[in-house]
Amino acid sequence: MPGSGVSERKPALLVPGYTGSKEDFLAVLQPLAAAGRRVVAIDMRGQYETPGEPGHRHYAPDALAADLAGLAAAVGPDGRGVHLLGHSLGGLIARQAVLARTTGISSLTLVGSGPGALRGQRAAALRTMLAHVAEARPARRAERIRQLWETDLEPQAVADGAPAHIVAFLRERMLRSCPEGLVAMGQYLLSCPDQTAALADPGGSPVLVLYGENDDAWTPATQDRMARRLGAQRVCIPAAAHSPAVEAPETTASALTSFWNAAECGERRRKADGQGAAAAGPGSLGVVSAGAAAASPSHGRLGAAAAMPSGHRPR
């Protein structure tokens, strides 16, 4: 959803979590765009309206991170840079893009995303789901996902009080997601190594770790420790769980806007310092800051989005 007037700030690229889609960010899209930046949310490869590819290799973290690199270049052309945000699994993939030295990443935000593999009850539930789907032949996996929806996921959504139109959307999204991608990305969630040390680069882009105080995927304590190891800023959203963008959208959007604005101010200061050093004599150049465009409407992979968090009932 476009903000009013000409956008003046760097754009943001939002990446959803496992079983998620671009629709996971609708509740924060307007307030983020109103701050003067283009905001683009995507479906990763194989998610909802983005076509999938046969074979696990297309869903390896490096392959998905390469997709983000191409999208970042498209969203922030001419070296303007983008603010990259990943929710849950999307955070693990966004982290991979940064570790791959993707150019043009002005900041990284990890929302409800941990240092490594998923643990606890959510991990146990995911293992059960993957066993049910992966044991079938590839040609039968879509039918297994349909059965899983009808026997487990839909009754749970109804029991949680989701309105009928939301249940219908969640069904469509689940059944349109690529079975091969669901299996491969789920397996990565259960086996992802802790790469916090590799990400903790003192000279790298600013990092924000944002999580709900009741997160039941990676615990708040786990995410807080990760933030400290990264030397990152950290924000705990009161009354939110695993999907702060839906559960507390105004607070979440305010925290994101403040962080992104501060990151851009830091770039401008570094640029000014570099110019001053150049005038005085040889020295390192600062990073150039650039503005951003207005938010675009939703059109498939590059669409700006609507919000329904992975595994949570949207409001």
Image (cartoon, rainbow, N blue to C red):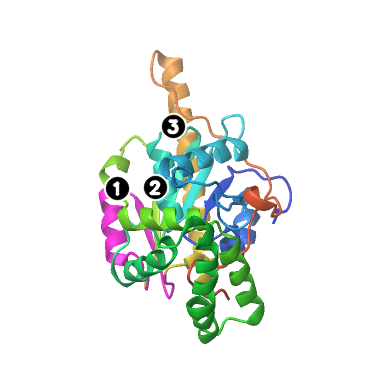
Looking at the image, residue 139 lies above or below residue 75? below
Looking at the image, residue 47 lies above or below residue 274? below
Q: Position of residue 61 (x, y in %)?
A: 41, 45
Residue 208 or 26: which is nearer the viewer? Answer: 26
Residue 99 visible: yes
Disc 3 marks which amino acid? Arg
Residue 294 or 45: which is nearer the viewer? Answer: 45
Disc 3 or disc 1, which is closer to the eye? 1
In whole angstroms, how far apart are the C-alphas of marks 2 and 1? 8 Å
Mark 3 highlights which residue?
A: 270
Disc 1 marks which amino acid? Gly
Q: Is residue 229 magenta?
A: yes
- Under circle 1, the secondary element is loop
Looking at the image, residue 312 lies above or below residue 75? below
Q: Mark 3 vs mark 2: which is more N-terminal?
A: 2
Mark 2 highlights which residue?
A: 207
Q: Mark 2 vs mark 1: which is more N-terminal?
A: 2
Mark 2 touching mark 1, by CB under 8 A? yes
Q: Residues within 10 Å of mark 3 (few under 14, many from 20)?
A: some
Q: Position of residue 289 (x, y in %)?
A: 54, 34
Mark 1 highlights which residue?
A: 231
In whole angstroms, how far apart are the C-alphas of marks 3 and 1? 19 Å
Q: Position of residue 218 (x, y in %)?
A: 33, 64
Segment colored magenta: 214-241
Q: Residue at x 63, y 67 (%)?
A: 172
Mark 3 touching mark 1, by CB under 8 A? no
Q: Position of residue 37 (x, y in %)?
A: 62, 48
- Under circle 2, the secondary element is strand
Q: Mark 3 vs mark 1: which is more N-terminal?
A: 1
Mark 3 touching mark 2, by CB under 8 A? no
Q: Is residue 157 magenta?
A: no
